[in-house]
Image (cartoon, coloured by chain):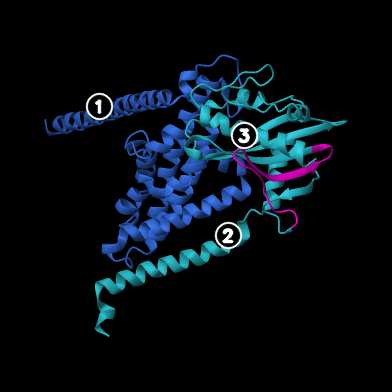
Amino acid sequence: MSFIKTTWFKCIVCLLSIAVISGASLSILNNVLAVSPEMRTARAIKKIYGEEKEYSVVLDIDSNDDTKNAPIEYEGVGSVNKVYEVGSDILFQTTGYQGYKNGTITLWIQTSQTDNTYSINKVILEKYEKQTLMSKLSGDFYGGFKLVDATEAYNNGELFTATEKTADNYNPVSGATYSATAAANAVNCVFKYLGVER
Amino acid sequence: MKTDFKKIAKDGIISSNPTLKLVLGTCPTLALTTAAMNGIGMGLAVSFVLIFSNVIISLLRKAIPKEVRIPAFILIIATFVTIVRLALDYFLPDIYESLGLYLPLIVVNCIILARAESFASKNGVLASAADGLFMGLGFTLALTLMGAVREILGAGAIFGHKLWDFSIGFFSSSAGAFFTYAMFIALFALITDKISEKTKLKKIKAEEKDFCGETKEIA
């Protein structure tokens, strides 16, 4: 039993004790302070609308309901992660591919419906991966996606591109073309969803 | 030994101000001072971690073998940083988002490890808590003032409230952060030097007075 008095044993016991106590306290706190997917959605809705609103889930990858938690993938473009009906609006969370270093950009996109026309009202950044020049994508950039007849655009085969200029789709970003492409792809997922799924 | 709380307070806020005198924690200082609110958020988060990690390290200072003190300190600091992250995400999600990557990076913030190593591991619990509090306060004040200046000049706003339409974009940029930081360090050094010169002069005058008084008495 002489090893109990050795320095290496004391060191291991000390570090292990701190790690175990820290781990136990953090797991308790994590249970108390964990933010549920529902809370995150309510926060996102509050951020977009400026107030809390009732919503119904059409698709949510974090949902426990197996009929509603499968993301819709559009190869090479992006994926639709969440779709909520908020009053007459449809709120999307989509992830656009082909960003810098094959990274992604995830956006919240608020669309509203008038008759059979869907228009994009607001685009807000949620998160991004591997992008380094996100500061170049300002509020004006996201504002460039607004007020577009999304269904018409889809029917005409028009999608947002980061580098080409068309009459309505002028949205280039100098110096952050890859990130702008990923953001445009995230918005294009909404076009595709509205054209195919609805 | 009696704890000199006045000295600890003076050291934390002025003489050994972590940001403006010791130039520690430069990374969050430069990156997060685009707005005054960010400065307050980061400052308070660091203060919380400083106070509680100092207290725990001081309590365990005799139990932690010196060979593993640094990993032990980092384990303790990381625990409190995780608590801050969980609490901010739950209660103040806007600040949590604005601090972003710099929040988990508090674990490797030089100020916290430096105070753990140089103060908390050698002093009592109360003194260590006070050291954490005043060092955190010094850091928070520096970050908030820098954030306020950069927000006013770079965005024409303060605490998110628009003041005027005039703004100088340079102050919101990285170069503007370095420039503002340099100006603050220079100004702080100028003010503290002037104060210490005045204090020295006062001391010399007082000593001269005492000396003259003594010589008169002898005569």
Screen quadrant of the N terminus of chain A: bottom left
Secondary structure at badge 1 equals: helix
Displayed quadrant of residue B13: top left
Q: To which residue does mark 2 refer?
A: A30
- For residue A148: magenta? no
In percent of width and height, residue B49 lies at 46, 51
- Number of the front mark, 1 or 3: 3
Q: Position of residue B86 (x, y in %)?
A: 56, 53
Q: Point out which mark residue B48 bears.
A: none
* Residue neighbourhood size for the residue with mark 3, other residues' Cα within 10 Å, grouped as few (<14), some (14–19), many (≥20): many
Of residue A122 and residue B28, the one placed in the foreground of this image is A122
The residue tagged with tag 3: helix, strand or loop?
helix
Q: Judge left or right: residue B68 versus residue B211.
A: right
Tell me the subunit letter for badge 3.
A
Which residue sits at x=17%, y=29%?
B212
- Tell which residue pokes out farthest to the right in this image: A115
Vertical position of residue B70 compared to residue B176: above or below: below
* Kind of residue at badge 2: Asn
> In this rendering, would B177 be left or right of B199?
right
Residue A91 is situated, as x and y percent measured from the top left of the image, at 74, 39
Whether residue B79 can be seen here: yes
Q: Chain of mark 1?
A: B
Q: How many marks?
A: 3
Give the labeled residue for mark 3: A185
Q: Residues within 10 Å of mark 2 (few under 14, many from 20)?
A: some
**How far is mark 1 from mark 2, CA to CA?**
57 Å
Q: Quadrant of residue A52?
A: top right
Q: Mark 1 touching mark 3, by CB under 8 A?
A: no
* Chain ID at mark 2: A
